[in-house]
Image: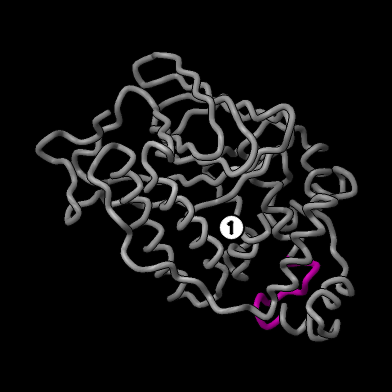
């Protein structure tokens, strides 16, 4: 598989320039969900963390391919190809994905998509794991820090492209950066536990305060100081972002998406969704993948929270 002419193959000093559209995002699917048929307008990496999927691809040369996706595999789609996803019928599926463009001269999409295994190229797995960790860290509101992390994501995606297409293995610069313990860690753990048991839903402030060992007032102050909104609104934005991703990347009915993201009924879901995204869910779905489902999370710095909650 060759993306670059032999005389233009990238080296560590000439790695391809990558520009991601939205960074690395996460999508969740109920059993039996489908997505597509769609036509890709850019490149897309997809890697599953739970569940499985069947990926049907119509290549640029007109060939039809079927790939089985599961954790430990990385798929790469190309601009102009048509594809469709069929998610596992017997269990939920979760995956991370990244849309990106490669304006580097000589970058030429082959006639077909491909799936690579982490067993075959262990560095792919390490890069994907590190990209996921960086996604969790993009929750801050400091614009310089967010810009630096966005550049780091683009750099790692460039390395991921090179390794995927068979270039010599490169190790991303820097070590395993981890943030210090966050005072809200216990709050996120409590929300994650509640959502794992009951699905995404409202989690009362009393429960959050008890989990963190602080008062209700302190919980509100922490959220206001960190994100500019209270805990109920912050977690609703995360749930709405999940719903927007499902609208954009699946054929799941609106009522099912509303239920899966913790809204009492489709009417309530539509009202809350329209308030945040500026249009009803059905219209948002018709707009396709040109919109960013995580856009409401970026301003208050909730993108990392959403990634942490899975």
User: Quick one: 271 or 55, which is closer to the camera?
Assistant: 55
Q: Main secondary structure of the magenta part?
A: helix
| Span shown in magenta | 224-234
Q: Is residue 152 visible?
A: yes
| Image x and y of residue 209, in percent | 83, 78
Q: Is residue 167 above or below residue 202?
A: above
| Image x and y of residue 39, in percent | 48, 28
Q: Which residue is mark 1?
A: 295
Quarter holding residue 265: top right
Name the residue located 34 percent from the left edge and 68 percent from the top edge: 174
Q: Is residue 225 magenta?
A: yes
| Image x and y of residue 144, in percent | 43, 76
Q: Is residue 230 magenta?
A: yes
Name the residue located 37 percent from the left edge and 48 percent from the top edge: 123
Determine whether, in the image, residue 282 is placed left or right of residue 136. Answer: right
| Image x and y of residue 58, in percent | 45, 19
Residue that sits furthest to the left in the current view: 7
Crowd tier of the residue under label 1, counting other residues whose Cα lies within 10 Å: few below 14, some 14–19, many 20 or above: some
Name the residue located 31 percent from the left edge and 44 percent from the top edge: 163
């Amino acid at each position: 598989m060759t993306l670059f002419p032999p005389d233009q193959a990238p080296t560590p000093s000439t790695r391809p320039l990558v520009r991601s559209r939205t960074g690395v995002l996460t999508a969740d699917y109920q059993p039996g969900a489908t997505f597509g048929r769609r036509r890709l307008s850019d490149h897309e990496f997809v890697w599953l963390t739970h569940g499985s999927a069947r990926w049907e691809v119509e290549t640029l040369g007109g060939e039809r391919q079927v790939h089985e996706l599961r954790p430990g595999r990385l798929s790469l789609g190309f601009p102009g190809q048509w594809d469709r996803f069929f998610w596992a019928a017997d269990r939920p599926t979760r995956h991370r994905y990244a849309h990106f463009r490669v304006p580097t001269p000589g970058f030429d999409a082959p006639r077909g998509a491909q799936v690579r295994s982490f067993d075959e190229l262990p560095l792919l797995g390490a890069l994907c794991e590190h990209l996921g960790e960086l996604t969790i860290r993009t929750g801050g509101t400091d614009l310089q820090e967010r810009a630096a992390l966005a550049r780091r994501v683009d750099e790692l995606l460039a390395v991921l492209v090179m390794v995927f297409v068979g270039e010599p293995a490169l190790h991303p610069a820097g070590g395993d950066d981890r943030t210090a313990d966050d005072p809200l860690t216990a709050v996120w753990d409590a929300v994650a536990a509640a959502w794992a048991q009951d699905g995404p839903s409202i989690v009362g402030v009393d429960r959050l305060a008890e989990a963190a060992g602080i008062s209700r007032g302190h919980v509100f102050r922490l959220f206001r100081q960190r994100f500019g909104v209270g805990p109920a609104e912050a977690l609703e934005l995360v749930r709405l972002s999940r719903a927007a991703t499902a609208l954009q990347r699946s054929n799941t009915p609106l009522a099912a998406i509303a239920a899966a993201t913790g809204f009492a009924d489709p009417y309530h879901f539509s009202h809350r969704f329209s308030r945040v995204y500026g249009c009803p869910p059905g219209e948002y779905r018709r707009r396709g993948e040109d919109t960013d489902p995580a856009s409401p999370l970026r301003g208050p710095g909730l993108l990392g929270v959403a990634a942490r909650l899975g």
